[in-house]
Image (spheres, helix red, strand yellow):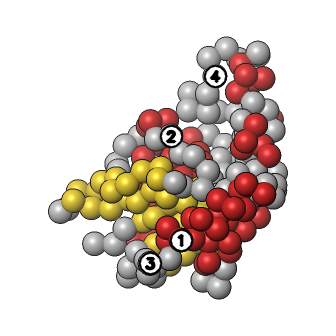
Amino acid sequence: MAEIWLSRHGETEWSRDGRHTSRTDLALTSNGEADARRLGSRLADHSFSLVLSSPKQRALETARLAGFGDQVEVDDDLLEWDYGEYEGLSTAQIRADRPGWTIWNGSPPGGEAVGQVSQRVRGVIDRCGAAGGDALLFAHGHVLRVLAAVYLGLPPTEGVRFSLDTATVSVLGWEREDRTIRTWNEG
């Protein structure tokens, strides 16, 4: 059965600094570019029937630097969770007004609820399932964590349990008829 390979984009200034980044279109740092190139060597020996990316330059550039620029297709459903009014803020800044807040326990004002993100990733999972082989996704930390939870049949908020670093590879697959995590957060 086909697998879904997940790759979070390389480092940006905001990911490095712990700032929530959804719709702001940031470039990779020089470290992020180097990490994306190294990611390419991790992925080079595998064949993919489908390669998708968020439309944001940090994801598309990671795909290009990893060697998939000619194969990648943009999919808006891989956009990061919309943080609304919390865009660009750190968790500490948000908690000054909302103690204990995380993206997993409270929708950001003017942004997306977890159910909306969940609905988007269900379409991506379906598209991957119809690809006829393994799929590779270049996207963002929170949306990929929701995707993993939904893929496994868990509530989307259980994505909280799947820490995901920049420029890593994770593989969702199968053990017999059961969906599983084959690898997670490998650099």
Query: Quick check: marks 4 and 3 in contact, CB under 8 Å?
Result: no
Q: Residue at x 76, y 50 (%)?
A: 12
Disc 1/disc 2 C-alpha distance (Å): 22 Å
Q: Which residue is mark 1?
A: 41
Q: Is tag 2's residue or tag 4's residue first in the polypeptide sequence?
A: 4
Where residue 179 sits: x, y (%)? 29, 56
Mark 1 vs mark 2: give the one in front: 1
Inspect the image, locate mark 2, and give the three-letter code of the amino acid beneath it. Ser
Q: Residue at the spot x=41%, y=40% of the render?
A: 155
- Number of the front mark, 2 or 4: 2
Alpha carbon separation for disc pair 1 and 4: 38 Å
Of the residues shown, which amino acid type is indicated by label 1? Ser
Q: Which residue is mark 3?
A: 45
Q: Which residue is mark 4?
A: 101
Circle on res. 163: 2
User: Which mark, residue 91?
Assistant: none
* Secondary-structure class at tag 3: loop
Side (left or right) of 166 relative to 152: right
Q: Nearer the viewer, residue 82 or 52?
A: 52
Q: Secondary structure at mark 4?
A: loop
Nearest the eye: 76 or 54: 54
Query: x, y percentage for residue 103?
Result: 61, 33
Q: Crowding at label 1, few (<14), some or many (≥20) Cα neighbours within 10 Å?
A: few
Q: Quadrant of residue 174?
A: bottom left
